[in-house]
Image (cartoon, rainbow, N blue to C red):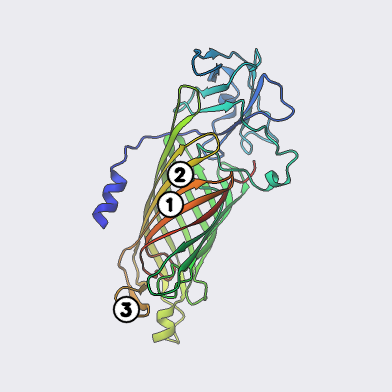
Amino acid sequence: MKKLLLFFILSSNVFADDVTIHSLTRGHNQTSSELTVTFDDVGAPNENIATNKGNWSAQCLPNSTTMPVNLEIDHAPHTGKGEFATNPTVTLFFKRTTDGCQAVHIIFLSGKFPSATWLTSSKKDTSTSSIWSKIFDPVKESDSGTPDYSLSFTWAPAVGSNPVYTIDGSVQHRFLSGPPSLSFVAIAKSDSSKKADPDSFNWAMQLLHAGQNGFGWRSKFAGMEFDKAGNVMNSISEGDVVWRHFHDTLKADGSLAFAWSILFRAGVELGDNFKNEFTIANQPNQRGTGFIFRGVPSARFAFVIPTDAKHTIKFNSNYTVRLPAQDELFLETRHVKDPVPELGTNPRHYLENNLTFNITEYFAFKIQHSYGALPPAFKFTDHKGSVGIEFTAKQPR
């Protein structure tokens, strides 16, 4: 299994990319000679570079059989609310209208030349009038990163027993855009199985910064890990370095053909275990195992294929291994009737694969596979497949 995981991670070609475009839109109050570009907060370019019209290229795509026509840019000012660092937004003003264009393709001539395409069939920005859009933004089809909000309900049949129902959720709510950005993050993974429930809940404050050439760093602090019964509790902090690459490929008409990204992390987790099931059962007068130190390398691969204008297939695979330096709790579930609590420094692997087919902008049909153990109880879950529904959204800018 270890060799298979290592092969999967190392068999992908990796490159570096430092700037990504979050969206290309036209609001209700904008003319046909304007389009607004919003960069991703993490890794946004310098304002002087982003607002230099010479750093932009734009083309009008009349139809699939006609050669693209260059759109000359008159100026490209920052038009977002507040400072550019907290709202990296630029509006491109063209010297001619985009009437007659089925699509407009723009390229930012810096870094690894990130691009975006605006289709005339796209819905206009309704964030000024929609209550729903003030709370959530849809995850765009070319976004292969993680959503800011997610909640999924999945179901797995079981032979000779009741089906297993799983609930997974995550939140990444941004308070400051940075750089670095400051967010509250929380993750919950649990199911109805008494024996092999992943039973992992955690929260923390997060600082995130992306530098040049796809490199960045992340720090989580003031965090907690616990199970749903409160039998295992850790205070935890984390620091890691990140390397990410994003790539998209367009069709001849300017629409997205596919996009993919790969991300590697190398980090450490440290904290304090002040309660666990092992000490409750065997050493009731001991508060916990104390100091926690783990090495935590991880990798994520994501792939996106739009099937038509409204539907997209997304696949992502996430692998993490935790390497405890001190004895930590591990709940063995293999070949036993009930989970057996153990202490040790054995590696704790976790693999999760997700395949989704979107039904609406916010909801998708989901197929999930998972294997391994998650903190704080590290209750081992053997290969498990499930199907269900997932909600995903981005935080509005």
Say few, some or many: other residues with alpha carbon within 10 Å of mark 3 (under 14 / 14 to 19 / 20 or more): few
Q: Pointer 2: what residue? A: 314
Looking at numbered disc 1 in the image, what kind of residue is underneath it?
A: Asn
Q: Can residue 245 be seen in this view?
A: no
Q: Pointer 3: what residue? A: 336
**Tag 2 near tag 3, CB within 8 Å:** no
Q: Is residue 391 visible?
A: yes
> Which quadrant would the C terminus be assigned to in this image?
top right
Q: Mark 2: which secondary structure? A: strand
Q: Residue at left 61%, top 34%?
A: 88
Q: Earlier in the sequence, mark 1 or mark 3?
A: 3
| Badge count | 3
> Which quadrant would the N terminus be assigned to in this image?
bottom left
Q: What x and y, as percent, mark residue 375?
A: 43, 66
Q: What x and y, as percent, mark residue 73?
A: 61, 16
Position of 152 relative to 245 (above/below): below
Say few, some or many: other residues with alpha carbon within 10 Å of mark 1 (under 14 / 14 to 19 / 20 or more): some
Q: Residue at left 54%, top 27%?
A: 117
**Tag 1 near tag 2, CB within 8 Å:** yes
Looking at numbered disc 3 in the image, what kind of residue is underneath it?
A: Val
Q: Mark 3: which secondary structure? A: loop
Point out the residue furthest to the left here. Answer: 3
Q: Pointer 1: what residue? A: 354
Pick whichever, 235 or 305, lies toward us.
305
**Distance between mark 1 and mark 2 Cα atoms:** 8 Å
**Tag 1 near tag 3, CB within 8 Å:** no
Q: What x and y, as percent, mark residue 96?
A: 65, 13
